[in-house]
Amino acid sequence: MKNINLEIKAEEDAVPFMDLLLLADPSPAMIMDYLADGTLFSARWDGVVVGVFVLMHIDDVKWELKNIAVAPEWQKKGVGKALLQAAIEEARREGAKLLDVGTGNSSIDQLAFYQKMGFRMRRIAKNYYTLNYPEPIYENGIQCRDMVVLTLELTEGGDG
Ligand code: COA
């Protein structure tokens, strides 16, 4: 679908967006934890909420995308790509030089999604999900144990 024109807005109250946030992260406790320090953005298309993302300031150069989700009925239409582009622009506007995102070893679709947008694998946080999540997570028949951290360089010509 072409011409996706998202209206991006910082939100104070996360409650109306919890269902969306839970699509990307099964742990309400982890979500509440990073919402305390991060900024939640909603994305509307023609007035309808189609997705969310959460950005967190890490240090002078780095920001982290803690959550990104598109409402199920809006997925696979290019909204995720537009949403990720909006998150990248927001991080850049804040002065970030690097944008990190972490995803599970089992999150095959998401690994494709981020790499198609230019993110490159940087490190693996072994046992991140087994240590930080109370219930085992399975996707694509694989247990989600390790976090793959991908980074996008936001400086001109940066390719890691
Ligand atoms: N397998 C391979 N590539 C995929 C894919 C899949 N299942 N889903 C999306 N992609 C690719 C698309 O092919 C597209 O690339 P293209 O432009 O080369 O065709 C690109 O990713 C963007 O697709 P888009 O339609 O914009 O994605 P989307 O609107 O479905 O959003 C997510 C992608 C991941 C944000 C969405 O599926 C989602 O909200 N999932 C649940 C929450 C989640 O997992 N969040 C990430 C947590 S790490």
Image (tube, rainbow, N blue to C red):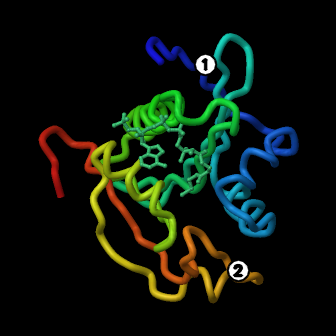
Q: Secondary structure at mark 1?
A: strand
- In this rendering, would 29 be left or right of 149? right
Closest to the observer: 100 or 109? 109
Q: Is residue 107 above or below residue 159?
A: below
Q: Secondary structure at mark 2?
A: loop
Question: Which mark sits nearer the N-terminus, 2 or 1?
Answer: 1
Type of amino acid under label 1: Glu
**What label sits on residue 126 in the rendered view?**
none
Question: Image quarter for residue 137?
Answer: bottom right
The local crowd at label 2, few if under 14, some if 14 to 19, many if 20 or more residues have their Cα within 10 Å, is some
**What label sits on residue 7 in the rendered view?**
1
- In this rendering, would 2 be left or right of 17? left
Question: Which residue reaches farthest right?
Answer: 15
Type of amino acid under label 2: Tyr
Q: Position of residue 127 (x, y in %)?
A: 53, 88
Which residue position is annotated with label 2?
133
- In this rendering, would 60 be left or right of 30? left
Residue at (55% x, 68% y) in the render: 140
Q: Is residue 4 above or below residue 31?
A: above
